[in-house]
Image (cartoon, rainbow, N blue to C red):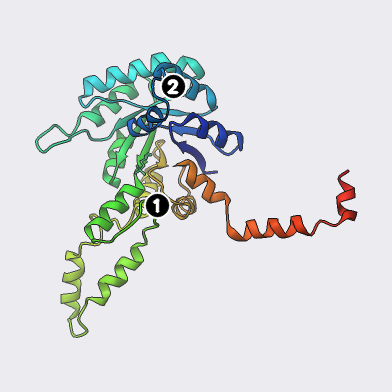
Amino acid sequence: CMQIFIDTADLNEIREAYSWGIVDGVTTNPSLIKKAVDRRPGLSMRDYIRDICRSVEGPVSLEVKGVSTEQMVQEAEMLYERFNPVNGNVVVKVPVCTAMEDGQPLFEGIRAIKTLEGRGIPTNATLVMTAEQALMAAKAGATYASPFLGRVDDYLRTKLDIAFDKSDYYDPLCARHLEEQTWEEEASGAELYDRLMRSDISDNGIYSGVDLVDSIVTIYDAYGFDTQVIAASVRNARQAREVAEMGVDIATLPYHVIEDMLTHPKTLEGMQLFTRDVVPEYEELFE
Ligand code: G3P
């Protein structure tokens, strides 16, 4: 069954969602830690991370902050040695590619993943934006690979100049229809093919974040990789459903997406009606 991780460093959210019995792990990153710290200035990071590790029976991803292989490996060892003894559930998140500017070395992250695999430290290859990166992460022995669906959608819709809110579902079929409308009726097949080939609605043949997960699941299945796919940067319930349809191993979800997956206006209305219709005869049964 698809596992659900909660994508947050907010201890209250983790504890609450975990108490519902449907959360199998936690993923954090420096931005999520920043949000948690902003809410609780002065917290002891060491104690806080220990509390997070204790709060779930399942993997907790903690991210390195360095950009060279050496730094990342050292940091990963520190995180693992310090926090894994708490509950035996630490996984170290390593960016699959750490180049921040043109000309910087690209291969530090992948080398760190390979090194950590050799040292028995479980890794979560993060910031995966292409299936090619996911393939490399699996070859390097990553325990998990995290494609960032929402950010791929952001990239595509920004390229297309589509206005969006972060949690909006991005439907690549709509983008295709828009594109078709711009075709001239009298264009020849060759011209249409040429236009399609040069069209800008995909990222090298990937049409959405969900499409990216599909591609990665297909590649991993084809070769029987042990690396598990974590659909990450999930922004809405529909994306979560679509990756579940693909049989993705894990989806890591913000608290509000988990909430959305449980709610529907007709469920709410139904609850109001059922509650209203409880007759005394039925009430008596529960006394
Ligand atoms: O798991 C990755 C996630 O935290 C990034 O999400 O919505 O900032 O792209 P987002």
Tell me the residue at 57%/49% (across/down). 262
Give the quadrant of residue 187: bottom left
Position of 179 with respect to 63 (left or right) is left
Q: Is residue 278 above or below residue 138?
A: below
Is 212 rendered above or below residue 123?
A: below
Residue 215: image location, x then y, percent: 35, 51
The residue under label 1 is: 167
| Closer-to-camera residue (194/10) | 10
Asked if the residue under mark 2 is in contact with the one under mark 1, i.e. CB atoms within 8 Å, the reply is no
Going by the numbered disc 2, the residue's amino acid type is Ile
Kindly state the secondary structure of the residue where label 2 is placed.
helix
- Where is residue 104 shown, x and y percent of the image? 12, 33
Asked whether, in this view, residue 131 is left or right of residue 55, the answer is left
The quadrant of the picture occupied by the N terminus is top right
Instruction: Identify the residue under disc 2.
Output: 49
Residue positioned 22% across, 76% down in the render:
182
Amino acid type, residue under disc 1 in the picture:
Ser
Q: Quadrant of ligand 1?
A: top left
Q: Is residue 48 above or below residue 225?
A: above
Q: Disc 1 or 2, which lies upstream in sequence?
A: 2
